[in-house]
Amino acid sequence: MDTALAELREWFDREGLTRRLIEYSEPEGIIERVCIPLIALGPGDGDFVAAPHPVTCGWPGAPLTAMTLEDYNVFLFRWLEAAVHLGLVRCAHCGKRILDGDDLPDPDTWDAIFIEKELVAWMLVHFDCKRWLAKKLKGMQPFDLPVRPAPHIDLSALTPGETERRPDAGTLD
Ligand SMILES: [Zn+2]
């Protein structure tokens, strides 16, 4: 395991956001699987990617080891913002592309959501799709998902202010 991933896993552990599964398989015997938080880039099981380490994105803000969860949320918000700009994100419920811009028509307005259940994940969803999402996510297990590495996104050009601003993220009730 590379250093960045080990550091990220340790940090998520500290925040209580990793999920573990003990299982028995041949020929390894008893093994422990660890899942760090995920990002849903769309509605399908195959749309989940692992949350990235800020250093791999050139994050110009505070280092991970000095971050609070709130700081990481700012980083993740900026990552998602850039991913939307690049056209990489679809709604976690309906699968329509999440659009960039401040003045979107009502059906296209969306919110960033962080869920912390058995599945720990960030996702973007239209306002109108939000109410359908809780049912879909109920009982969802991270270990059933074919998690891929996050696409590389360069955040090195952000200003210090942008790395500190709090995101206006929603919550899923
Ligand atoms: Zn939607």
Image (cartoon, rainbow, N blue to C red):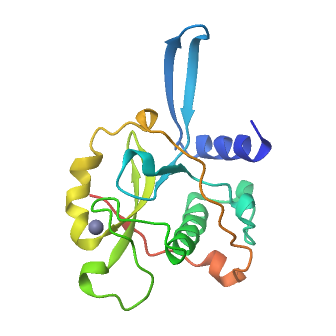
Q: Is residue 4 above or below residue 170?
A: above
Residue 80: horizontal and vertical position, in percent?
52, 68
Q: Is residue 115 above or below residue 101?
A: above
Q: Position of residue 124 (x, y in %)?
A: 39, 65
**Where in the figure is residue 17, as x and y percent of width and height?**
52, 44
**Residue located 49% across and 25% down the image:** 21
Residue 77 relative to residue 55: left or right: left
Foreground: 123 or 170? 123
Q: Residue drawn at (30%, 71%), measured in percent from left and top? A: 126
Say which quarter of the image contains residue 99.
bottom left
Examine the rendered structure and indicate whether residue 21 appears above or below residue 117: above
Farthest residue in the bottom direction? Answer: 103
| Residue at 61%, 43% in the rendered image | 14
Q: Quadrant of the N terminus?
A: top right
Looking at the image, is 14 positioned above or below residue 92?
A: above
Where in the figure is residue 25, as x and y percent of width and height? 52, 12
Closer to us: 134 or 129: 129
Q: How many marks?
A: 0
From the viewer's side, name the closer residue of 29 and 22: 29
Quarter of the rendering occupied by the C terminus: bottom left
Quarter of the rendered image showing ligand 1:
bottom left
Quadrant for residue 41, please give it: bottom left
Identified at 65% across, 66% down, the residue is 153
